[in-house]
Image: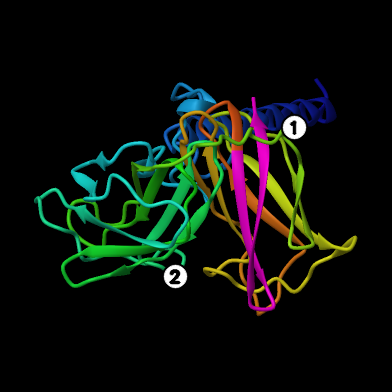
Amino acid sequence: MSFTSRLSSSRRRALAAAGTAVVLAVTLAACGSSDDSGSSMPGMDHGAKPTASPSAQDHSSMPGMDHGAMGDGLADAKDGYKLTSGATELPAGKETAYKFQIMGPDGKPVTGFAEEQTKRMHFYAVRSDLTGFQHLHPAMADDGTWTAGLAALEPGTWRTYASFTPDGGPGKGKDFVLSRTVTVPGDVRQTPLPKAATSAEADGYTVTVKGGLMAGMAHPLTVSVSKDGKPVTDLQPYLNTYAHVTAFHEGDQAFAHLHPETKVEGDKGGPDLAFQAMLPKAGNWRVFLQFQTGGTLHTAALTLSVS
């Protein structure tokens, strides 16, 4: 064999060895990454662990998602915390004060609460047909008694929700939504749920929602606000966001809170706001979107269908 042939053969062997080393290195890196729970490769599922179905995945660490402790808000007690109130009936047609307490696992009223969107307590009242939505921020007395000043209520069955985060104890840092029902006596007239739609009117503003939804899966939603056909760019911060969105499920009144991904930057925002939505059940959801302009709070309501 000539010198040139021997040199060419040597080069081929060297290249082959180098290629083998590269393949081995890549293989080892891939094997090593399978023990990393996907932390270094967002959006990827590795073969080392079985992939959970979308409805079973833990969304608690996802930006803009509610924490697992929150639940659907249909129980008055969870993980040792309990919503209590002496009120089982409220008067119709006039303002009234609803008093309640959050009892801790030690059986005592909780008085330490962390701020969530600038408030220590978010309180909601919704009638069984998903009308009459009220979102309040009650005041707490030293003994842990909260007082929510409700506007006039129509006769029917109402569900009241307390959304809070303990600032101490075993539930410190966990989000909770607990609820109770209360009766308002009188002639009850049920309002049919409006059909599913992608837009709604409120005080001359048009709110449009874009994005598909499937039960138990996180989906991006875009909310756009316009007026007289023109984009609204003067949305004011409200609860440290440009829009506050709450949803209630038709039938059982399950609760969901959609946290916005659009950060507050300055005194004006809009027209487009991004949300990460995960509604746990299929069916119709009545969505209430609150936003503020010129110092006035507006509430737009629309029905979204979740498959």
Q: Is disc 2 placed on a helix, strand or loop?
A: loop
Residue located at (54% from left, 70% from top): 240
Q: Which residues are magenta?
A: 286-307
- What colour-coding does the image apply? rainbow
Which percent across, then down, holds residue 263?
Answer: 61, 66
Most frequent secondary structure within the magenta stretch: strand
Looking at numbered disc 2 in the image, what kind of residue is underneath it?
Thr
Looking at numbered disc 1 in the image, what kind of residue is underneath it?
Arg
Q: Is disc 1 placed on a helix, strand or loop?
A: helix
Q: Is residue 191 magenta?
A: no
Q: In screen coordinates, is 130 left or right of 76?
A: right
Q: Report which residue position mark 2 lands on.
A: 118
Q: Is residue 294 magenta?
A: yes
Q: Work out whether mark 2 precedes mark 1 in sequence or the reverse, and give the earlier one.
A: 1
Q: In screen coordinates, is 110 left or right of 183?
A: left
Q: Report which residue position mark 1 lands on.
A: 11
Q: CA distance from mark 2 to mark 1?
A: 69 Å
Residue 140 image-quadrant placement? bottom left
